[in-house]
Amino acid sequence: MTFRAAVVQMSAVPFDKAKSTDKVVSRIEEAAAQGANLIVFPEATLSGYPKGLDFGARVGGRQPRGKEEYLRYYNGAIDVPGPETDRIGAAAKEANAYVVIGVMEREQGTIYCTALHFGPDGALLGKHRKLVPTAMERIIWGQGDGSTMPVYDTSLGAKLGTVICWENYMPLFRTYMYAKGVQLYCAPTADDRDVWLPSMQHIAIEGRCFVFSACQYATRGDYPEDYDAIQGDSADAVIFRGGSVIVSPTGEVLAGPNHDSECVLYAEIDVDDTIRGKFDLDVVGHYSRPDVFRLLVDEEPKTNVISTEAVLGEFTA
């Protein structure tokens, strides 16, 4: 089966979830007009990645301004489900396309870096929460658990899954995704370095899967005037330089990388290429040694509070 895929390289409207959603819907419409059946957006598309902020955090102390910065960021995050997911779902339905998008999700008082998956019927299929926030991200984001690592069967004839940014450097997580049969491997990211491309090529070759990596392209002018940008205060100072890319199961770059502007990348996808690639390399099949190496994965959700009623129910069920 063949279909057309799109990777959207765009800036969020930082801290403004309504305007960010407007922009996302517009890009979905644009990609759909070009015949895209799968549309992938960057990490933290709703409502921005606060690159360069320190949230007033130092080892052993936090400055009061950091709490105000966190409040602003929290107010720009979204509830899942919520009004923003309803709008994106409606746009996915209108486009008759699968949509994968990175969002800042809030629950209780915590923000999670999350990827949402929408079906062509507009349904929110589910989410993946980033397992390990990277470096300073741990100041402002919580950790996901093994209950949100889905791989979906799709009407595109291939299985769809998402690994966020530096999770792609977690070999055991990649192995888990390969074992789930992922063929359409989405990698929304905030990593705009040159070394990101060879990492995406390695994963495509290793997993014999198509890789869709979307990163933001953003300048200082995309951020609020009072944003403390370490990159400089010139409106055209680059905050994110993009680098979005689509890679085939043999490591061939099908589209991108683009380091110059916002854009939408397109590629024609032949799902059978994922099977052709498994002829000589299947890292969880004939090219594995389960008698030597085995991976244990805990997919149970982890909750902080368990009622006695729930515990007793487990024993009486």
Image (cartoon, rainbow, N blue to C red):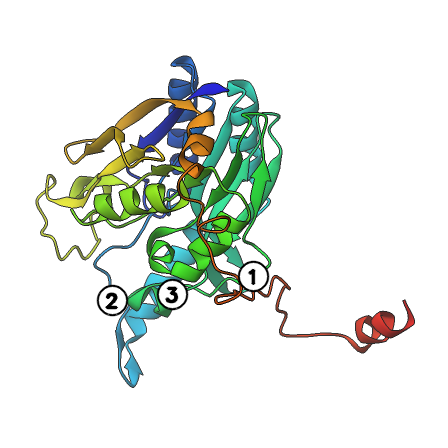
Q: Secondary structure at mark 2?
A: loop
Q: Which residue is mark 3?
A: 140
Relative to 156, does residue 227 appear above or below in the rendering?
Answer: below
Residue 271 in view of the camera = no
Relative to 31, does residue 40 appear above or below in the rendering?
Answer: below
Q: Nearer the viewer, residue 284 or 313?
A: 284
Distance from the alpha carbon under mark 1 to that under mark 3: 20 Å
Callout 2: 10 Å neighbours few (<14), some, many (20+)?
Answer: some
N-terminal label among 1 and 3: 3
Q: Secondary structure at mark 1?
A: loop
Q: Residue at x 86, y 70 (%)?
A: 313
Q: Nearer the viewer, residue 55 or 164?
A: 164
Left of 147 or right of it: where is 219?
left
| Numbered circle sitting on residue 54 | 2
N-terminal label among 1 and 2: 2
Q: Residue at x 26, y 49 (%)?
A: 199
Q: Which one is closest to the eye, mark 1 or mark 3?
A: 1
**Residue 42 appears at what percent x and percent y?**
35, 41
Q: Secondary structure at mark 3?
A: loop
Q: Residue at x 43, y 18 (%)?
A: 32
